Image (spheres, rainbow, N blue to C red):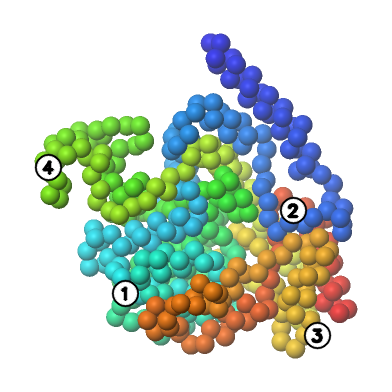
Amino acid sequence: MTQQEALKQEILAKTKEYYELVHKPQQEKEFVAGKSRVNYAGRVFDEKEMVNLVDSSLDFWLTYGSYSKIFEKKLAEYLGVRWAFLVNSGSSANLLAFYALTSPLLKERQIKRGDEVITVAAGFPTTVAPIVQYGAVPVFVDMELTHFNIDTTQLEAALSPKTKAVMIAHTLGNPFDLGAVKAFCTRHNLWLIEDNCDALGSTYEGKPTGTWGDIGTSSFYPPHHMTMGEGGATYTDNPLLKKIMLSMRDWGRDCWCESGVDNTCGARFSQSFGSLPKGYDHKYVYSHFGFNLKVSDMQAAIGVAQLEKFPAFVEKRKENFAKLYEGLTGVEGLILNTATPNSAPSWFGFMITLKEGLSFTRNDLAEHLENANIQTRNLFAGNMLRHPMFDTMIEGVDYRVVGDLAHTDKIMNDSLWIGLYPGMGDEAIAYMIDVIKTYVQTV
């Protein structure tokens, strides 16, 4: 062993020792009801993530590199798709997925400015933002209040000659009715983007969510199913979409050489493009107006370790959901989210919706839980159309609405969710059940 290799092994051993001394006690800290904070989500990690991170930092490659390649390969294998591409966030994944559908390479199926994309208003803004930012028209459909996903009975009413795609998320890990949505898209030759950021590990009819549509997206922000700090991914089985996404992720370039590699095509100085001089350096030929959305290899190093744990994360989420559901079933006044038929959700959170006519509001319940050291979250934006970002948008021009979005408003006003992430133990689950039941039954 060389001196530098011996030193590296010593540093990695010290990293593990540091984890055992500093981070492990925090993760194993005893839960004290009413005093310990019950977060809605959190990082679950051990020394392997920290060792990988330090190992990558010692190489000092910094940008997309060896760990990134490993992660993309393993994520694609887990999902059963041909290609997965790392990006710097789930929001960037949605941006890349949508903008890929605007490529001229798609010819008559290219999404152009003014074309319409069916979506929902109850969710996270960056599912919709790329549509608006490009100049396409989002068409908002209401939700249903059993599985809290898109109301598929309204899809035909949302359709117009300008409709090119459907772009929606699986709510808190619960798959939307993929059978109905996929059939609708196939019938009308529409693209389907699955925002899978809250649902990695979920399946529908035994097939992973995110792989039913043309492109799926994931987020690896710390609260999500697994983390690398900041980070995200897109994935597809479509060779043309693969080519487009690689180009747009990496500045819009035409070249497909990996970072630090030159002349993969063997024709770097001999091709013709546009009205450029013949033989213009292929590494600096741009076929799209793209971005730089790559992730650092240090983040990917964390993700590689997280992927090894991921199947266990999914099972723990399912177990925690089942315990919360059993504990709160039958509590008068509460509507609980249930799994979509034919699905096995990898739950992101446990949503509670209040029935009509109660003596307390959603905010009353949220404030009570927060005072009891239980962290709560709304279903993100609630109804996006009611936010200031839509103040300058003109209905019928910049966006369309199908119906009155009554259920979306119901979710905005009367729903919240609590956590069930893998780091949450039985004591925390039991405490949340007790606090909620006691409040609802006595207030």
Q: Is residue 38 above or below residue 184?
A: above
Residue at position x 31%, y 49% in the image? 252
Three-letter residue code for mark 4:
Pro
For the residue pair 281 and 75, the one nearer the viewer reads as 281
Q: Residues within 10 Å of mark 4 (few under 14, many from 20)?
A: few
- Element type at marker 2? loop
- Element type at marker 3? loop
The answer to whether 366 appears left or right of 178 in the picture is right
Residue at position x 83%, y 72% in the image? 437
The answer to whether the residues at label 2 and label 4 have Cβ atoms under 8 Å apart is no
Q: Position of residue 135 (x, y in %)?
A: 35, 70
- Element type at marker 1? loop
| CA distance for labels 4 and 3 | 74 Å
Sequence-earlier tag: 4 or 1: 1
The quarter holding residue 202 reads bottom right
Sequence-earlier tag: 2 or 1: 1
Q: Residues within 10 Å of mark 2 (few under 14, many from 20)?
A: many
Q: Which residue is mark 4?
A: 277
Q: Which residue is mark 1?
A: 114
| CA distance for labels 2 and 1 | 46 Å
